[in-house]
Image (cartoon, rainbow, N blue to C red):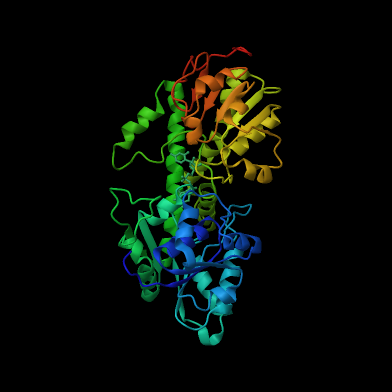
Amino acid sequence: MREIKPFKVAIVGTGYVGLGTAIMLAYLGHDVVGLDVDAAKVDMLRRGQLPIYEPGLAELMQQAGERLRWTTDYAEAIPEADAIFICVGTPPQADGRPDLKYVAEAARCIARNLNGKVQVVVNKSTVPVGTGDWVARLIEDNALEYHANRYFVVSNPEFLREGTAVHDSLYPDRIVVGGEHEEGVKRLVELYAPLLEQSFEAPEFAPRPQAYTRPALVTTSLGSAEMIKYAANAFLALKISFANEVANLCEHVDADIEEVVRGIGCDARIGPRFLAAGAGWGGSCFGKDTAALISTGADYGYDMPILQAAVTVNTRQRHVAITKLQRHLRRLKGKRVAVLGMAFKPGTDDLRDAPAYDCIARLVDLGATVVAHDPIAMDRARREWANLEYEEAPTAQAALKGADAVLVMTEWQEYKDLDWSAACRLMRNRLVIDLRGVVTSAPAATVVERVGRPSLGAPQDTTLAEGVA
Ligand code: UDX
């Protein structure tokens, strides 16, 4: 690894973004202290355990070694830091606006512990436009007089995806740095030099992709950087909703959404990615960020009609599985329905805004017995979905045993690799509602319903008799 100029970095908040950033910066060679007010979490991290499941992150943490420390104490983390990252949560409130109380609390605590040397405060939490200025004022109001103005606030949004966070943080498409002080922006560019120049040694478990050279550096005003994060997520969300809308129409006109996407995706102006139709988007970002952007629009009297439509399509998409089930089974009361996949996407145990939740809740409402399986997220679901009445299955096969139908809600590799012929033989009624494109051919005597594509194994409107063997 090329010699780097190591920074002393403090990361406030050890959620997905904070953990990923802390571990990545320490891996690159900086001295990092991660801070969280949750003592249990910090204890766990000190023991070398991660509070989340993220492929490769534990290995990267191990390689960062001594350069990475954890604390609950602002007085330990802040005074020595050259750069202080705010990575705390901004959970949505009932009206869609993000709750900035954790950001405010972090800013106040940082301010009280600044020691007068020039420090840069980096906002990485996803926050509405204008928050950076507000954070700067909060720090100014809470810092000791002597220390005022000896720091710069910059915005440095994060674009990593859960499940591929290690890869995304080492090989980003772009690094966005927004700020009003040239010095603050310059500092951050120096901090990211190993990433910008790709001068670090790639870890074995996350090799540098062949075609990858280096990320684009986008320097902007504070407000633009804040807007870039929202606009990027909103655009991706609306791409998915658009694909779902076209897919729903494909089912009526005998077109196949996968062929359609292949056709439009070759146009470089459109691109093939984020056009996979299915259960609709979930996760911690798209729902929250589209709602936040719509509420920002409302603050200025603009109703954001395109985004509103993207949200409406996504909400409707949550019912697609149930509609398809009802078309085949009519009444769901008393039926046994297997649900494969609970996490909002594969590669993570994150259940936030997972489409599977809505499906299970609706099935239970309709009187069905739900037997659910997920390779990683079942433990978490036991805690976070305690209000839902479903049975757990130790394996996918166990979930399918005696079931009247199976819903595939998450495209885990394990489900792609499943011996579907053998698994479907365990079912009482061989109906597969595959919302994630994991089943490529219909097992014998089985109907596979898909989104935006012709069904496999039988015409789409076939109603299976109960107990078809
Ligand atoms: C997203 C953004 O991709 C990332 O840049 C940002 O920093 C955080 O939000 P993440 O929420 O981790 O990342 O997941 P992502 O892979 O984007 O998927 C979001 C949801 O969209 C998932 O539920 C996924 O299943 C769904 N999706 C994605 C589709 O339904 N179709 C697609 O084509 C792509």
> At 67% across and 42% down in the image, what residue appears?
382
Compared with 203, 36 (above or below) is below
Q: Is residue 94 visible?
A: yes
Camera-side residue: 57 or 380?
A: 57
In the rendered image, which quarter contains the N terminus?
A: bottom left
**Residue 286, image x and y in percent?**
50, 47
> At 64% across and 52% down in the image, what residue appears?
94
Compared with 379, 468 (above or below) is above
Residue at far bottom of view: 146
In the image, taking residue 352 as reference, residue 162 lies left or right, namely left
Camera-side residue: 191 or 124?
A: 191
Camera-side residue: 356 or 58?
A: 58
Count of number-bearing discs: 0
In the rendered image, which quarter contains the C terminus?
A: top right
> At 57% across and 75% down in the image, what residue appears?
76
Camera-side residue: 187 or 365?
A: 187
In the image, taking residue 145 as reference, residue 380 lies left or right, namely right
State which quadrant residue 452 falls in: top left
Compared with 366, 127 (above or below) is below
Q: Is residue 300 visible?
A: no
**Residue 25, image x and y in percent?**
43, 64
State which quadrant residue 315 falls in: top right
**Residue 459, image x and y in percent?**
48, 14
**Residue 24, image x and y in percent?**
44, 60
